[in-house]
Image (cartoon, grey):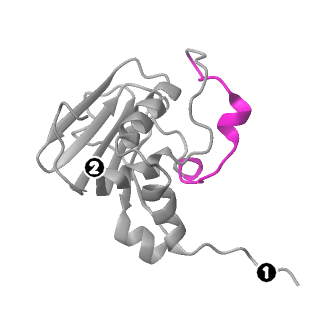
């Protein structure tokens, strides 16, 4: 008899908030993800209620692959698609580190095929449903000036951060 392997939602919390001992790991992870997707620019905006990362990289091509944690495709590929940079990420877990900063991450992305998505990582929904909301966007005012790239807005901050810290 074969039984499916199931993961308790607590594993998501473990991977997202306890995997990193450094509270600034999410900043490194977000910038590393931008590097791996050939971003030339990353802008970090700090507001009292949010931290936003915006890059001009390749964007997320396939939300299903992006949401498949532990996917070995980066290890197999080894280099970025356009600039042929040596990839930093390997397991696809970096996006979960956003939960160190806050309880919700809204990802707006436009890829090279001009496909737009809104991916909402909500800690409570993930822990309750083991699911993430993905919505294809036909046009979004926040993406209108972006040829391609990704915007990650983290809200529900766990503490106040200063510019110097980040």
User: Considering only vertical position in the picture, is 91 above or below 112?
Assistant: below
Sequence-wise, the earlier of marks 2 and 1 is 1
Nearest the viewer among 63 and 7 is: 7
Q: Is residue 76 above or below residue 13?
A: above
Q: Where on the picture, by quarter, is residue 56?
A: top left
Left or right placement of residue 16 versus residue 122 in this view: right
Which image quadrant is residue 124 in? bottom left
**In the current view of this chain or complex, which residue is farthest to the bottom?**
1
Write the start and end of the magenta stretch as one range: 64-82
Say what secondary structure mark 2 lies in: strand
Please report the residue visible at 40 percent of the width from the left and 44 percent of the height from the top.
22
Mark 2 neighbour density, 10 Å: few (under 14) some (14–19) many (20 or more): many
Residue at 62% in and 38% down: 90
Question: Disc 2 and disc 1: Cα gap in Å?
Answer: 37 Å
Towards the viewer: 98 or 140: 98
Q: Position of residue 133 (x, y in %)?
A: 41, 62
- Disc 2 and disc 1 in contact, CB within 8 angstroms: no
Q: SS of the residue at dot 1?
A: loop
Position of residue 136 relative to residue 37, above or below, is below
Position in image of residue 79 (x %, y %): 64, 23
Q: Quadrant of the N terminus?
A: bottom right
Q: Which mark is residue 37?
A: none
Residue under pointer 1: 3
- Residue 166: x and y in percent read 26, 34
The residue sitting at 26% across, 33% down in the picture is 144
Residue at left 41%, top 41%?
25
Q: Is residue 166 magenta?
A: no
Q: Is residue 118 left or right of residue 50?
A: right
Return the residue at label 2: 154
Report the number of discs. 2
Q: Residues within 10 Å of mark 1 (few under 14, many from 20)?
A: few
């Amino acid at each position: 008899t074969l039984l499916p392997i199931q993961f308790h939602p607590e594993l998501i919390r473990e991977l997202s908030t306890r995997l990193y001992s450094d509270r600034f790991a999410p900043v490194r992870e977000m910038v590393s993800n931008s590097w791996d997707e050939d971003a030339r620019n990353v802008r970090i905006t700090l507001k009292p209620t949010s931290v936003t990362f915006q890059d001009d990289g390749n964007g997320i091509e396939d939300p299903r692959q992006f949401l498949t944690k532990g996917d070995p495709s980066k290890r197999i590929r080894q280099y970025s698609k356009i600039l042929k940079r040596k990839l930093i990420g390997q397991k696809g877990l970096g996006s979960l580190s956003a939960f160190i900063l806050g309880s919700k991450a809204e990802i707006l992305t436009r890829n090279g095929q001009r496909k737009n998505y809104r991916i909402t990582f909500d800690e409570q929904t993930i822990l309750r449903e083991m699911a993430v909301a993905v919505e294809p966007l036909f046009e979004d005012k926040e993406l209108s000036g972006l040829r391609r790239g990704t915007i990650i807005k983290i809200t529900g901050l766990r503490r106040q951060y200063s510019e110097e810290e980040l």
